[in-house]
Amino acid sequence: MIDSAKCIAYGVPYEGDVWDFYLGKAEPKEMLPVASVLTIPAAGSEMSESSVITNEDGDVKLGYSNNLSRPKFAIMNPCRTFTLPPYQTAAGVTDMMMHTMERYFTKDDDMDFTTDLAEAALRNIKDAVFAVLKNPEDYRYRAQIMWGGSLMHNGLTGCGVSDDWATHQLEHELSGMFDVTHGAGLAAIWPSWARYVMHENLSRFVRFAVNVMDVPNDFTDPEATALKGIEAMERFYHAIGMPINIKELIGRDITDEEIKEMTRKCSRDYQITCGCLKVLQAADMEAIYKMARG
């Protein structure tokens, strides 16, 4: 709803189609002020410059970022999240963790302070979700999740590094085509993306495995350590009720035709790439979708 409010706020003073901003055809010069009352910690939109909307004409889901859209204030009361269903709680945590992971998996290895912040945030949220799944009215851990969701998408955990966002862009086609929960879609895509790109910065995946997922470091075999970190993340997803492939996500096998259609949309008719750690061409996108089919 916050993203919808941002879209409306862009559109009111604009004489054209607000979709122009999301297609990159125009830049807003002004917008109405936006505020938020947070009830589902997940997107971090209450503190970020980002918004994502779906155009139901073609089931196209796109994001747009502009500092004009950062909310003027946000009311954040963890008590408002006590009644969140377990699935939405887990999907929200998956989404907020991915906001930091999109920044964490980078080729930039010279911002240790930022990296340490990111790892601490990921460990904190990873632990907090189990507490609230066990006791939905645990104020302390609901508060950790709510505050973490904001800090994990306001730029703090990616300060000074290049970010990736390929997993998000790949997932947008899943939720656009199949109307699945965004966080669950991210969980279904990330393990395949990680295996596909990990050799672009293997040491970063080793660090993630050891410092975030508590995997023992096999100094003789960094690739094995990295893979165990990805496997540990898959176990975490399953432990909180998230899928780890597309079949688990949508409840059936995805067809080759559907994969090709998602690839076409993600690449904007084969005109753009996505990702930064590894720049993904359309063929790479298709390969990751196929790896993730389950």
Image (tube, rainbow, N blue to C red):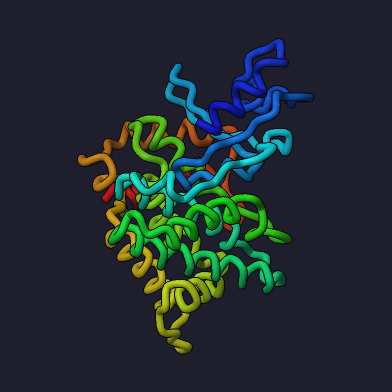
Q: Which residue is drawn at 55% across and 70% down?
A: 120
For residue 94, above or below residue 251: below
Q: Residue at x 68, y 65 (%)?
A: 108
Which corner quadrant of the image does residue 139 belong to? bottom left
Residue nearer the viewer, 220 or 103 = 103
**Residue 224 place in picture, x, y as percent:** 40, 78
- Residue 287 located left or right of residue 135: right
**Can I make out residue 146 in this image?**
yes
- Find the residue positioned furthest to the top: 15
How many numbered markers are drawn?
0
**Residue 170 place in picture, x, y as percent:** 46, 43
Q: Residue at x 70, y 59 (%)?
A: 159
**Residue 88 place in picture, x, y as percent:** 35, 45
For residue 223, above or below residue 279: below
Residue nearer the viewer, 193 or 241 = 241
- Residue 166 located left or right of residue 48: left
Which corner quadrant of the image does residue 213 belong to? bottom left
**Residue 91 place in picture, x, y as percent:** 38, 48
Residue nearer the viewer, 272 or 226 = 226
Q: Residue at x 58, y 36 (%)?
A: 36
For residue 294, above or below residue 197: above
- Find the residue positioned furthest to the left: 252
**Can I make out residue 70 in this image?**
no
